[in-house]
Amino acid sequence: MGDSHEGVGMSFEEASTRFVRMFGEKDPPVRPVGVKLIPKGKEIPETAVSPAEYQGTPWCGAVRIAATENEAVVITKENVGCPAAAIALGLVDEQQTEHLQGKRKYTDLMERPASPADFTNGLVYACKDSGNMQFALFGKDDTGRYETLGTAIRAVSGMTAIQPAIMDAAVAYPPGKLGITPDVVIVGVRPKQALLAIQGHNFLTGSRFEMSTIGIRAVCADLTAVPFLEQRANGSFFCLGARAVGGWEGDLLGLGMPFSLFRIMVTGMEKSASGFPYKAYP
C-alpha cells in the first residue's frame, strides 16, 4: 500500500484516540485493537485476567473482547477456542493429528472435535462430501462450508497462516492497556467508516486498497496473519465463526493492518478532513 514516514513516532494509544476522533462523538467506531504476536521463548505480557479465564475463547472473540470490553486477552495453544485460528496464528502445526484438549468453543459444537490436520486437509469444511459428519456444526443437515472436498482443499490453500508454528501466544489489547507496540491493528467499522479510513491512507499514498477474503478465518487469517506476513492492510466481512461464535455484530466489517500503516492512515485522515468531510456522508 505504499511507503511513507507520515505518523512515525505516534503511539498506539495516541493514534487510536485520533482515529476515533475523526468520526465525531455521534458516530464512533469500535475501539481499535492492538495485536502482539509472541514468538516461542519470548516473554508473554502479563494481563489483569489470566489466560485460563478465557479457556475456549476463539481469536475472533478475543479481539472483540479487547474492542468492546476494554480487556487484554492472551491466547495460546492451551486456551484457543478454534483450531483454525491456532493454525493461522502459528500456535500449532497445521498437520497436528491430535485434537486440542479441553473446552474449545468452536469444536465443542461438533459431535467429535476435529484436529488441526482435519481442518488443513479440508475434512472439516467439506464434512458432508468427505463423509465426516462428526465435524458438522449444525447437525445432520449441515452442508459443510464447501460442497466438495476438492473445493475445500483449494480454499484452505489460500488461507494465510503463520507456519511452521513459531508462536507461543497472540495478545489482543485495547489502547492504553499494555505498554507494548502492536504488530497489527484491527478495527471493526461500518462501511462508510471504512471508506473514510481508506481515503485517509490513499490521500498520502495514492495506492488502491485490495481486499482478500473468503468468509472463513476472517479475524485470524484475513485481519491478523495477512497484515503480519505480507505487511499490508486487508479487510474482511468477518466469517461464520467471527459472527456466530465470536460475537461480531452484523453491521460491521473488519480492517487489519501493520501498526506502521495505521499511523499513516490516521495522519492521512486528519490531513484530508476538509477534502473528505465525514459529516457529508449520510
Image (tube, rainbow, N blue to C red):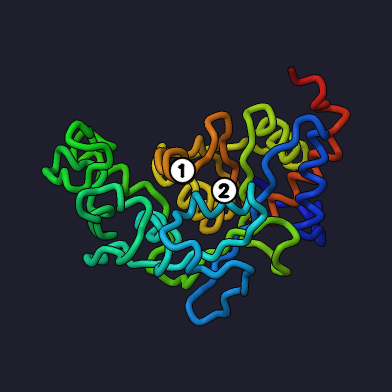
Residue at the image position 57 percent from the left and 62 percent from the top:
73
| Foreground pick, 251 / 2 | 251
Number of numbered tags placed on the structure image? 2
Judge the density around disc 2: few (<14), some (14-19), many (≥20) Cα neighbours within 10 Å. Answer: many
Q: Quadrant of the C terminus?
A: top right
* Amino acid type for the residue under numbered disc 2: Arg
On the picture, is 152 further left or further right than 41?
left
Query: In the displayed structure, does residue 67 sit left or right of residue 216?
Result: right
* SS category of the residue bearing label 2: helix
Q: Label 1, secondary structure: give it.
A: helix
Q: Judge left or right: residue 8 versus residue 86.
A: right
The residue pinned by badge 2 equals 64
81 shown above or below 41: above
The image quarter containing residue 43 is: bottom right
Which residue is denoted by mark 1 in the rendering? 242
Q: Where residue 115 sits: x, y (%)?
A: 25, 60
Is residue 82 found left or right of 48 in the rendered image?
A: left
Q: In this view of the protein, can residue 123 be seen by the observer?
A: no
Q: Residue lying farthest left?
A: 131
Q: Quadrant of residue 1?
A: top right
Determine the residue located farthest toward the bottom in the rendered image: 41
Q: Contact (CB < 8 A) between labels 2 and 1?
A: yes
Mark 1, Cα crowd under 10 Å, few <14 / some 14-19 / many 20+, is many
Outermost residue on the top side: it is: 282
Amino acid of disc 1:
Ala
Q: Is residue 174 visible?
A: yes
Name the spot of residue 185 as percent of width and height, x first: 64, 53
